[in-house]
Amino acid sequence: MANVLIHLDEHQGSQVSNEKEVAALDPNLKANKVRSGVVESIGPSGVYVDIGAGPSGLLLKNRITAAWNPPHRINVEDIEKMFSVGDEIKVMVHRVDTERQRFSLSTKSLEDSPGDMVKNPQLVYEKAEEGAAAFLARVAARRQEMDDREKARRVDPNLKVHDLKSGVVTGSQTYGVFVDIGTSSDGLLHSSQISHERVSFEDMKKMFSVGAEIKVMVHEIDNDRQRFSLSTKSLEVNPGDMVKDPQMVYEKAEETASAFRANIAASEQEMGV
């Protein structure tokens, strides 16, 4: 039995075209491809376009032009100023829903500048391939930017707890100091990990100015939350050394870090870890 297609406006529930038998959705139809089509009907939700892929595709009003913002204020009369039944147009396939046997279209993706479809739709159709290529390039660039940001938030997989690192102070808050140790994100030197003696916010501001070069030990790594904490308390030979003479702590950092790691290893061996 042939499929019967009735175009119904999605918001008003009104029929906007006559019944017609249509073939199943073309299995080769792909998103982001430019297609030529013919306007079949116009309704409050947008324009139905036959692109020869089985059922007609819906060019929703929010996908017609970037100039319509917000698109919900656009009515049928606005759409009919741009499209007439029988018009030959160019569209980009926006989404394909194989399960529901339907697809959506876009001309907004073909605009070189927002509003081109309002000013000169014919020019948009003539430059459709070029416009689509530019759109896909922008999408790819945004995805790459998002990927780069995500990678920047990840903790360096080579970073290990108890590693000794040189770093530069990048900022401070009441709860601690942020330090750039050359990884993709800064580590937090929490106030409780600065010294065995209590350190106030005023103390921190005196001890750590932005741009200061310091030595820190990696204290903890939270891979789930993609962040890590640091310690100078672990580098103190005597409690309070960071308050009294932080430069001396940095100068002896290698020696103190080695001793600290040796103590940890001895404790774990004693406990049978």
Image (cartoon, rainbow, N blue to C red):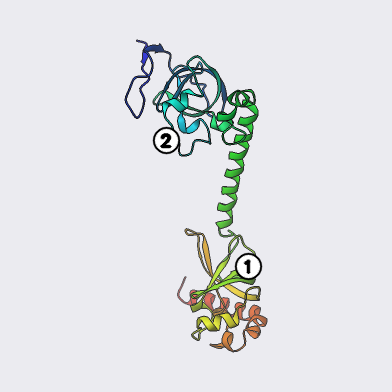
Q: Which residue is mark 2?
A: 73
Indicate which disc residue 181 carries: 1
x 39%, y 25%: residue: 100
Q: Position of residue 246 (x, y in %)?
A: 62, 84
Q: Residue at x 53, y 32 (%)?
A: 65
- In which quadrant will I find the N terminus? top left
Q: Which mark is residue 189?
A: none
Residue 70 seen in render: yes
Few, some or many residues within 10 Å of mark 2 (<14, 14–19, 20+): few
Residue type at the position of mark 1: Ile
- Pointer 1 or 2: first along the chain: 2
Residue 237 visible (yes or no): no
Give the image location of residue 66, x and y in percent: 53, 36
Q: x%, y% of residue 215?
A: 63, 76
Of 208 and 110, nearer the camera is 110
Q: Which type of secondary structure does the marked residue at label 2 adopt? A: helix
Count of marks overlaid on the render? 2
Question: Is residue 208 placed above or below 144 in the rendered structure?
Answer: below
Which sits in the foreground, 268 or 24? Answer: 24
Which of the 4 image quadrants contains residue 127? top right
Q: Amino acid at mark 2?
A: Arg
Q: How far apart, in angstroms, are the residues tagged by discs 1 and 2? A: 52 Å
| Residue nearest the viewer, comparing 80 with 213 | 80
Element under label 1? loop
